[in-house]
Amino acid sequence: MDSWHMLTEDEICRTVRVFNNQFIFEHTTDALMRANIIVKLCQEREVKTATTAFYNECIRLNVYMNKRDMAYEIKENMDAGVYGVDVKSDIYTYTSIFSDVNATTSEDLAQLVELYDEMLSRGIQPTELVKKPLIKLARQVGEHRLLKALLESPDTEKLTTLHATTAARMLTNRAQAYIAQYDIDTAKAQLEELLIYHIPKDTRPIPFSPGYVSGSSDIKIPLHFTRTREAFFIYTRSLYESIMRIYLIRRRANDARELLDDMRRTIYLPPTRMAYNWFIRFHAKRKNIQTLHEIHDMMLQDGVMPDEYAYTKFITSCMYHPNAQRLQKLVDTAARRSILDAPEKADSGHVLSTRLDEPDEGVQRSGLPDVPRHIMELANIHNIVYHPQACTRFYKSMFLEHEADIDDLRSEKCQPNAHIINAVMCAYTMLEKPVLVLREFQRFVRHQNRLSPHQAPSDLMKSIIPVAHIFKMALDAARVINNQWMARKILAQMDVWKVRLPNPVAKEAL
């Protein structure tokens, strides 16, 4: 502190700038606290500051600390000449004000637009750093006319003059804006523009996984790693995944898959688990089991371990009961692939019941809803709708990924939820393996009792219907192998949890 007078204004300004940049990249408030201490010490020791750059950093600091009034006061003093005749607002002053991370409402946007008009009236041409927060805020609040005007305004700055990672942040933000306007082709053009940049030569790996926010260019990266090759690829991946997501929303699965394959070839970073989950959700809903197998293999190749959500979708997609519309689409798709035989003519008014509790003669019990006979008489209908082998294969893979023994019911490494257990028990029922059905039932009961030893399990409250089906299949399996002791144990557990069967069965019959 004794050598404080030896510091120059330029050194103080650079220190505050470093802390401001650290906050914007790492999102840590410690950096703001340190910068604020430096500014207060300057005021207490009456350090002479007479440069625009220093006051611009003070504006940034107050904006980041959500002290807008103080930031605007500093700007007004700069315009009034309070800090000296050489201290005037410039493009960096407006950039500092526009970089308000706390601006989220239409009122905030109106205030920034007023400043934007003021900047243009002074003959100060906006840069990408000025337009980036305006574009982002206009997209968030849904001001599409302003968004379109900002995107169509002429660029006074060539992005090719910027560093690759800085350009990646700008282009990702613009792509998000085009996506908000449903202009996917132009958003993809931003990606193609980014791919022509020279890859940074700094190959230092980022020591920890950066924080990632879907649909945003705001990614937490340590300040001294922001110009590395890995940072560039992280921003590039974010842009890839933003476009893939909108492709899937628009049901353009082939375009999304092409983009996914291109990303895996172009950048060395694997897709995020979130991006894979988008694909899993899309194809699981449509029962595209072969595609789900491919996605699962891709995840394992990329070192991205599927989470509980992914495995729930993988497993339940093989066994869930489709509605009539989805069933018809599955049949039509299979017919086009020449997997099915031509349907025989039948009375369209007759309906064949395929309920588990009312099996028709000569038809395998499947759990399907009532569907027209001409659909049910098609060959291989069960192979199209239900995939018990695939279900159990996904299930075994889940245990392998968790390094757990599937036969060890006491293991806590892998703890399937009610939806997974329900699907797997249904698969083993179709494969006529009642012993494995009871094994999964016991696993489920052990796990739930471990989580909630003195009250009803949470899965029971969240998934009443799947839990009821679990007990129903367990009772059926116990009846098949004529295990009266297990049947009584199941009924006793039903009484403890107050479970009601989906189709009531007389306890005396068991």
Image (cartoon, rainbow, N blue to C red):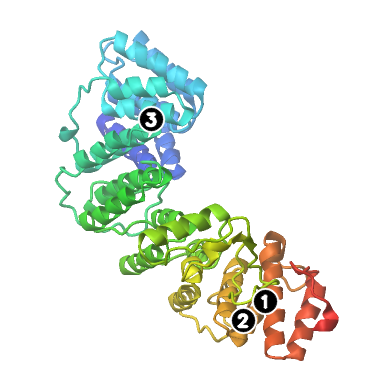
Work out which quarter of the rendered image holds the C terminus and state it.
Answer: bottom right
Question: Which type of secondary structure does the marked residue at label 3 adopt?
Answer: loop
Residue that carries the numbered disc 3 in the rendered image: 181
Residue at position x 36%, y 16% from top?
116
Question: Which of the 4 image quadrants contains residue 121?
Answer: top left
Give the mark, 2 or 1, whose residue is nearer the N terminus.
2
Position in image of residue 184 (x %, y %): 32, 37
Residue 400 falls left or right of residue 489? left
Viewport quadrant of the N terminus: top left
Q: Given this view, does label 3 or label 2 mark the residue nearer the observer?
A: 2
Residue tagged by mark 1?
A: 473
Tell me the CA gap for discs 3 and 1: 49 Å
Q: Badge 3: few (under 14), some or many (20 or more) residues near its Cα, within 10 Å?
A: some
Residue 201 as seen in the image, left or right of residue 18: left
Is 454 or 81 nearer to us in this picture?
454
* Label 2 – label 1 distance at C-alpha: 7 Å
> Which residue matches tag 2?
437
The answer to whether residue 4 shows anywhere in this view is no
**What amino acid is labelled 3 in the image?**
Gln
Amino acid type indicated by mark 2: Val
Residue 275 pos. (x, y %): 39, 54
**Residue type, mark 1 in image:** Met
Between disc 3 and disc 2, whose residue precedes? 3
User: What is the quadrant of residue 337 in the picture?
Assistant: bottom left
Residue at horizontal 61 percent and vertical 74 percent from the top: 365
Residue 329 percent coordinates (x, y): 47, 55
